[in-house]
Amino acid sequence: MVRLSIFEVTWNEMRVGKLALIVPVMTSTDGRWVASTTWMPAARAICARRWIVPSISLPATIIRSAISSTMTTI
């Protein structure tokens, strides 16, 4: 597994034309709130830059699995 900050993941995806929509969701097993990230194509890079600041306001770490597209936010 590779540890990446939210800023790094968002910046990398923004470079390839994707915009991160980070939504809090409750887990069904223990009732904790975690961030669910959905990637959608960004119309323009300026649009993605406007969204990156609010999405990285809290320090967090995303763990991305090297063998799948699974991502976990800590």
Image (cartoon, rainbow, N blue to C red):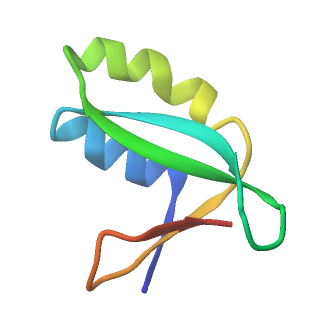
Residue positioned most to the front: 28
**Residue furthest out toward the right:** 31
Residue 15 locus on image (x, y percent):
21, 38
Q: How many marks?
A: 0
Give the residue drawn at x 40%, y 53%.
Answer: 9
42 sits to left or right of 58: left
- Residue at horizontal 71%, vertical 62%? 27
| Residue 45 picture location, percent across and down | 24, 20
**What residue lies at 42% left-to-right and 86% top-to-bottom?**
1
- Quadrant where the image shows the C terminus: bottom right
Q: Quadrant of residue 69?
A: bottom left
Please state the horizontal and vertical placement of residue 4, each as a whole percent of the image: 47, 66
User: In the displayed structure, would residue 30 be above or below residue 54?
Assistant: below
26 is higher (above) or lower (below) than 62? above
Left or right side of 44 for 73: right
Residue 67 percent location from the top left of the image: 26, 85
Does residue 17 lie above or below 72 as drawn?
Answer: above
Vertical placement of 55 versus 50: above or below?
below
Left or right: where does residue 56 sit relative to residue 65?
right
Q: What residue do we see at 71% from left, 51% from top?
A: 59
In the displayed image of the protein, which residue is found farthest to the left?
16
Q: Which of the 4 image quarters holds residue 38?
A: top left
